[in-house]
Image (cartoon, rainbow, N blue to C red):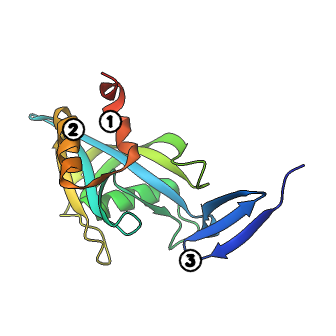
Amino acid sequence: MATAEETMWAGRFITAKKRGRWEYVSRARNIRAAVILAIDEDTQGRHVLLVDQFRVPLGRRCIELPAGLVGDKDAGEDAVDAAARELEEETGYHAGRMESLGEYYSSPGMISESFTLFRAHDLQKTGEGGGVDGEDIHVHRLPLDTLAAQIGAWRAEGYAIDVKLLLLLGAGMIG
């Protein structure tokens, strides 16, 4: 028999819940997330677009893949449209095509939120990026072959590193 879910607290974007003894957090109003893996290629090689911004829960800036909420302003927003919008707002790059790579869960023991991972193709620079409403997002276009070393340097400087960057580091971390 399933234990009933109890809402402990509800805010604009998150809800704290309890089911039996298990406490967890979910997104309010069925809001979801979209994460974008944007890799472009030119004569200099392959580059990935990363962003960093101050994250209040961490108390410091965090290096991340571009991402954003789906349906936070428009409940009917499609995830692919949100991904394309967030990529351009955050990085200043427009994707000619977005490919869904599936739905994933970042911390399933603590939060029920999932995100859809999109691969952005045919990138065109359209602006500077930086986000909206004072988000203060810094854009990094980084050669893929320098990623591991750069992440190490950022960590040494005190940046937080989003776990989703393990997508790009892969087996290279194992040795």
Q: Residues within 10 Å of mark 2 (few under 14, many from 20)?
A: some
Circle 2 sits in a helix, a strand or a loop, which is it? helix
The residue lying furthest to the front in this view is 21
The quadrant of the picture occupied by the C terminus is top left
**Above or below, comparing residue 75 to residue 173 in the picture:** below
Seen from the viewer's position, the closer of residues 11 and 94 is 11
Question: Residue 161, how many percent across, how many down?
Answer: 32, 50
| Sequence-first tag of 3 and 2 | 3
Residue holding disc 3 = 12
Q: Secondary structure at mark 3?
A: loop
123 vs 114, nearest the viewer: 114
In the displayed structure, does residue 70 sit left or right of residue 36?
Answer: right
Which amino acid type is shown beneath numbered disc 3? Arg
**Can I make out residue 46 in this image?**
no
Looking at the image, tell me whether mark 1 or mark 3 is earlier in sequence order: 3
Residue at label 2? 147
Residue that badge 1 annotates? 168
Mark 2: amino acid: Leu
Name the residue rendered at 37%, 38% in the picture: 166
Verify CB contact (< 8 Å) between mark 1 and mark 2: yes
| 53 to 160, vertically: above or below | below
Q: Nearer the viewer, residue 89 or 51?
A: 51
